[in-house]
Amino acid sequence: MSVAALDENTALPGVFGPLKGAGGNARITGPCGDTMEFWVKIQEERITRCTFTTDGCGDSVACGTAACTLAAGAPESVAFTLEPADVLALIPGLADESKHCALLAITTLRATISDYRKKHCPPEACSSCEKECSSRKETVPPVQAEPNGLSGVKHKIVVLSGKGGVGKSTVAAGLALSLSGKGFKVGLLDADLHGPSIPTLFNLSAVHAELFGDTIEPVRADGIKLMSTGFLLEHPDQAVIMRGPMKIKIIEQMLKEVNWGELDYLITDCPPGTGDEPLSVCQLIGSPDGAVIVTTPQEIAAADVRKSVQFCRKVNLPILGILENMSGYTCPKCGETVHLFGKDGGYKTAEKYNIAFLGRIPLDPDIGLCGDAGHSFMQKHSSSTAAQAFEKAVDLITSALKRNS
Ligand code: ADP
């Protein structure tokens, strides 16, 4: 089933127009200036009919139609949990700049169901079981006022490194892509405020996050929900100048005011080092499951890892393991492996501190090329040694989390 984006010559769909005798109705104007209005009829907690109008373009009409199509026949509780991604899945090829129409359609649909609930909550239930009614309202968070964007996140993993340039963001993105490839729902937060690289790694440098009421909608790519200060800047080359408290506020906002929704894993690419910023992430994220420490294999980098290990122990953050990146380069012609950045620094540190060793990601020029072009290395070079190493690291991490839960 799919819904085509309409042009002005196409006939309006059958779900377009007000619905006589509707039990719920809401009208919302989105930040784009378009207005949508929805109507629902509900019988025995199931949506029997859903219609809408919009003053927006053909893409708005397509999104409204898709939302009505998905809602009609569904239990109202299920229709309430529909997401913009569900609408987009019905409209293949919708232009990026029109994706906010899906968000507006879903937000208006939810408001319409809320309106129905408000009007139809049985008065006898309210007087006799006021608690039950108000608790029901609390368990169904409105889309624009998610109290804590992390409440639906099952596992939180922070990616740390003692210093910059060791491939921390590359590893964070590789872990997220590998988890997503295994069918998990994944979010990736770029908490590196001064050097946000996640937008570049996903070819999204020119993309801005949508603000909806008090909630920031994550950007989606390769099945992953992404957030970065890069999506909040007017221009990708804009310098980020912030003092300590402002940085903490922004990290808190990206954790709690982003509509992360239901996720199996949230991977956070932390700023390098062991200072205030990684500390804020660990404190604000609320019981992270653990840290993955990234290092290169030379002895001097291993010294930084030891600082990261001590940092985790001080803040009571379990360490899921050490991952050695840029670990040897194998010549594609003669097959010889050269250890340009030394050998085994991460492995030896893991052994010394009795920490799991998550493996070695080799130096692979395709990682750099894909990163610069914003292509998914994991998808483009899935059979490479490096991609296999990411898969193995993810298997070790997920097994460790399963054991701990
Ligand atoms: P950090 O987040 O630690 O600052 P990045 O992930 O931004 O590091 O990586 C720094 C540079 O190294 C990037 O250009 C990236 O493409 C490259 N890089 C990272 N890991 C590898 C690897 N295993 N092989 C080749 N290039 C890599």
Image: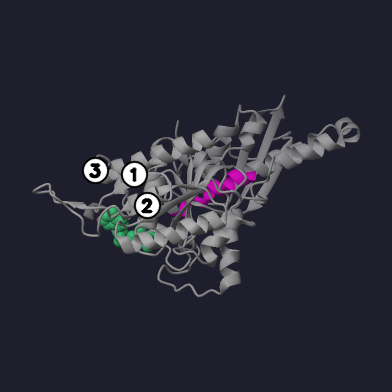
Which class describes the residues within 10 Å of circle 3: few (<14), some (14-19), or many (20+)? some
Residue at numbered disc 3:
384
Q: Amino acid at mark 1?
A: Phe
For image coordinates 24% across by 43% down, the residue present is 385
Residue at 46 percent of width and 42 percent of height: 10
Q: Position of residue 204 (x, y in %)?
A: 39, 57
For the residues labelled 3 and 2, say whether their Cβ atoms are less than 8 Å apart. Answer: no
Q: Is 44 in front, or is 49?
A: 44
Whereabouts is ligand 1, in terms of quadrant? bottom left
Residue 156 x/y as whole percent: 53, 47
Mark 2, ligand 1, within 8 Å: the answer is yes
| Amino acid on which the number 3 mark rests in the picture | Ser
Q: Is residue 45 above or below residue 361?
A: above
Q: Residue furthest front?
A: 352
Residue named by callout 1:
390
For this rendering, which residue is in front, 98 or 384?
384
Which is nearer the eye, 381 or 134?
A: 381
Residue at 44% in and 69% down: 235
Front residue (pair 105, 279): 279
Confirm or deny contact between disc 1 and disc 2 (CB under 8 A): yes
Q: Which quadrant is the N terminus positioned in?
A: top left
Q: Is residue 189 above or below residue 41?
A: below
Q: Identify residue type, mark 2.
A: Val
> Can residue 54 be seen by looking at this rendering?
yes
**Magenta region's main secondary structure?**
helix
In the shown orientation, is residue 272 left or right of residue 247?
left
Give the Cα distance between marks 3 and 2.
15 Å
The magenta stretch is: 97-108
The location of residue 160, given as percent across then percent down, is 45, 56
Q: Which residue is mark 2?
A: 171
